[in-house]
Image (cartoon, helix red, strand yellow):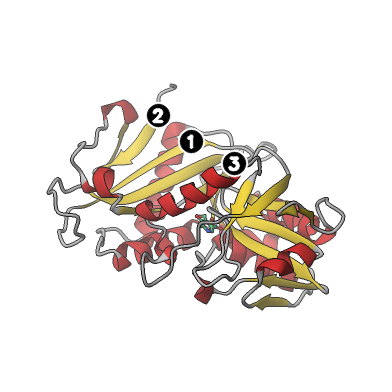
Amino acid sequence: MEQSFVFFNGEIVDEKDVSISIRSKVVNYGLGCFEGIRAYWDDEKGQLYGFRLKEHYERLLESAKALNMDIPYTVQELCDVTVELLRKNNFKTTTYIRPVVYKGSESLMPTLFDDDNRLMIYCQPMGKYAGKSELRVAVSSWRRITDTMLPPRTKSTGAYLNSALASLEVLQNGYDEAIFLTHDGRVCEGPGENVFLVKKGKLVTPPLSDDILEGITRDTVMTLAREELGMEVVERSVSRTELYNAQEVFFSGTAMEVTAVVEVDNRKVGDGHEGPVCKKLKDMFFNITTGGNEKYREYLTPVYDK
Ligand SMILES: Cc1ncc(COP(=O)(O)O)c(C=O)c1O
């Protein structure tokens, strides 16, 4: 592995000098929460742009608060240290940033009660997450965790076992990605992405009360649909069979970006290819990630001095 710098215990250090105890609660019980952020590289301008850093760190602090894992950093400090870390690594490619807040305590008791809250941030280059632009998906037999059990909005480390089980099931069955239903059977989200449908010219997506993560890409997509395409965006509960008859279905997420779903449970969505609304939103999304539209400049944090 090339030399990699990470943020660990309050400083930027060489990754090979970092270790976490095998006894720590994050290793044993998954007691942590995290974020997934992208920084987009623009070859023409020679610039790397952190995408919506502020919103990601706000969400991280909210997750941490819900889990009694308050950390002594402000959103601004977290944004600043991320820029410093990207610079130190000298990334000249689109990069994924992974901050993790975790319980470092080595006590055996699986409780969030103690104050041993720590933060680490690492980064790695990341291109296309799914490896393809049109996905075949299946509804998983595993239901999404619910707010009364393990709050999905906290983006907590342990909760990704639920995501991993759904992914395992559908990948073993030859699909590209899963869609979860909520515990009472409404369409929820993917294991790491939100879901959208185009129905009768409107953009439809499950509401926050249906146990989804409040996706930052979801928010971006809804804004672009309203502002740039003049579409009506409706947040409402969605039934499984609505997926089969939608004109379009697509995912949104930091890793997944905006990616078309062309088949659900072996039924073709629309004509079985990426639809026009998904294509337009995807193109606009990529354009704003590298500063192509002044109106959305505030989403971006340039990493390198120019
Ligand atoms: C379960 C889940 N839903 C949705 C998303 C999409 O959220 P965002 O667009 O903020 O990356 C993610 C990714 O973080 C996720 O893990």
Q: Give 158 or 202, whichever is nearer the viewer.
A: 158
* Residue 291 seen in render: no
Name the residue carrying label 1: 124
> Furthest-right residue in view?
271
Name the residue carrying label 2: 4
Q: Secondary structure at mark 1?
A: strand
Q: Earlier in the sequence, mark 1 or mark 2?
A: 2
Q: Does mark 3's beta carbon lie closer than 8 Å to ligand 1?
A: no
Disc number lying in front (3 or 2):
3
Q: Which three-letter amino acid code belongs to the residue tagged 1? A: Gln
Q: Give 31 or 84, whichever is nearer the viewer.
A: 31
Q: Which three-letter amino acid code belongs to the residue tagged 2? A: Ser
Q: Which three-letter amino acid code belongs to the residue tagged 3? A: Leu
Q: Quadrant of residue 270?
A: bottom right
Tell me the distance, in whole angstroms, between the alpha carbons under discs 1 and 3. Answer: 24 Å
Depicted 36 relative to depicted 4: above or below: below
Q: Earlier in the sequence, mark 3 or mark 2?
A: 2
Label 3 CA crowd tier, 10 Å (few <14, some 14–19, many 20+): some
**Residue at point 26%, 62% (across, down):** 70
Q: Secondary structure at mark 2?
A: loop
**Residue at point 76%, 63% (across, down):** 244
**Residue at point 26%, 28% (across, down):** 17
Depicted 165 relative to depicted 4: above or below: below
